[in-house]
Image: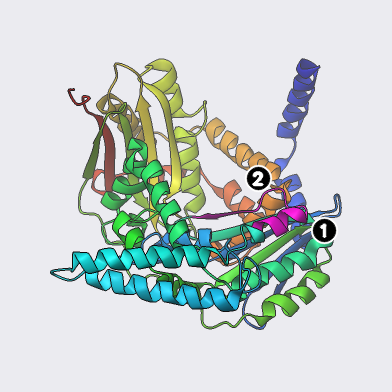
Amino acid sequence: MRKRLFLVGTVILAVWLCMPAARSDAQTFERMKAQVREHTLSNGMKWIVLPRRDAPVVSFHVYVDAGSVNEVNGITGISHLLEHLAFKGTKTVGTKDFTAERVVLGSLDSLYDAITREELKFKPDTARIAAQYREFETLRMKAQEYVAGNEFIDLFQNEGEPGIDAYTSWDATQYINALPSNRLEFWMAMTSDRFLNPVFREFFKERDVVIEERRLRIETQPIGRLVMEDFPAAAFKAHTYRHSVVGHMSDLKRITRGDVKAYFSKYYIPSNMAAAVVGDVDPEDVFRQAELYFGRIPSGPKPEAPRTIEPEQWGERRVQVAAQSQPILILGYHRPDIRDKDNQAFDALANIIGQGRSSRLHRVLVKEKKAAIQTGSFSGFPGSKYPSLIAFYAIPSQGHSNAECLEVILAEIERLKTEPVGEDELTKYKRSVKKDLFDAMKANGNMAAMLTASEMLEGDWRKVFDGIQDVESVTAADIQRIAKSVLTADNRTIGEVVPEEPAAE
């Protein structure tokens, strides 16, 4: 049965690939785009709704235009920490007695500030600090008495939420829900309250969770040390893409609840947020309830973007991480942001040279030379809102080295400059992009994510649909041109995990 389905699917795919794709794709996208409705609240929050009546479910996506790129030294990691704290409830959810809880939380903040001031003195009073920490732990236990477990999450799950979620990146923080469509008003009430009346309770407990996350994902993982921290720090000497989403350990240990409140007040405002609702809803009903619930949230001018622009790179940079690990290689070149006219050409270049089992790097490094067990590429690292990197990586196989893999990757890059990519490669890329986009659009949650991302990163949700024209317009000459101008030695950063011998016992 599975073989028969595979054969049928193969025939259908072959027929589809022979059809006049550009015209039919454009018509499909235009029909879908025509169904989308938008509305901007008086406080500046943008709402995008795509009704789909095929099932009584709805997906919600709230995009906050604040990620680690907005952080400065001293508060790195605060965006991610705030994401964690956003699940801790409000003045009415997650508490047994907010009036009493607020007093204890205020005392905790004041005492922690006093401890920090003492610790930062040239000659701190260690006895005093120890006494303060004892008092601090007593207050923490007192504050915990007022916490109503995971009430915020439990309420959503009781209403049919399969898995409440959120994530933080360099560019943004995003909150995700999926509920039965008759729970629209529940979502509106709960989520608006989350942004209107947040209480960052269990702050120190959650901060410790993030600290442990840093240890597990970065400090004890060679690839985490390199790719998430040292490589971006080498590639970006000025722009805030240089620090990791999880933040520096010293900052995590010093961030206060007051810092989180100030950061929230600056960035979690309606003018800096967008929401998408996709599923079994009436757009006008969504807009009416959004005005009722989210319209209550005070706003202000959208925060200014980071002022620092990454300067021109003056020569190749190299960074190494020594670890008891297999070797790992990554190299990146500075490229423009997502709004650049050549954005799709960079994506095409990355796809052709290093994405998938039919890519050039996989064919040469993995299949032919067997010098690597894995290789790949990606465009728009670590983010895409600002000028970033197009990067290539390889994990050498046993008996092979980073140097061997680097030689092959550089040779393939030079080949891009001297030989235009084949028409078959370019056609395959364009078809795969459209197929992947069609597949992603089938899921309400994916659609909501794409609509908000296009709105906030590119300035218009319509780019989700209109971007297919950019894909179709990419030429082999475009790819060769950007390869010549961007993939140069002076614009390159090379990062390596270098194996070290285990310490002698």
Residue 58's place in the image compared with 438, above or below, is below
Q: Amino acid at mark 2?
A: Leu
Residue found 22% across the figure and 42% down from its top: 318
* SS at mark 2 in the image: helix
Residue 176 lies within the magenta run: no
Image: magenta residue range: 153-168
The reply, left or right, for residue 320 in relation to residue 194 is left
User: Taking 492 as reference, is 13 left or right?
Assistant: right
CB contact under 8 Å: marks 2 and 1: no
Does dot 1 land on a helix, a strand or a loop? Answer: helix
In the figure, 311 relative to 117: above or below?
above
The quadrant where residue 363 appears? top left
Near-viewer residue (249 or 69)? 249
Q: Position of residue 43 (x, y in %)?
A: 63, 82
What colour scheme was applied to this rendering of the protein? rainbow
Examine the rendering and report whether any part of residue 270 can be seen. Answer: no
Residue type at mark 1?
A: Ser
> Which residue is labeled 1 in the image?
181
Q: Give the camera-side residue of 382 and 358.
A: 382
Q: Which residue is mark 2?
A: 437
Q: Residues within 10 Å of mark 1 (few under 14, many from 20)?
A: some
Q: Residue at x 62, y 79 (%)?
A: 44
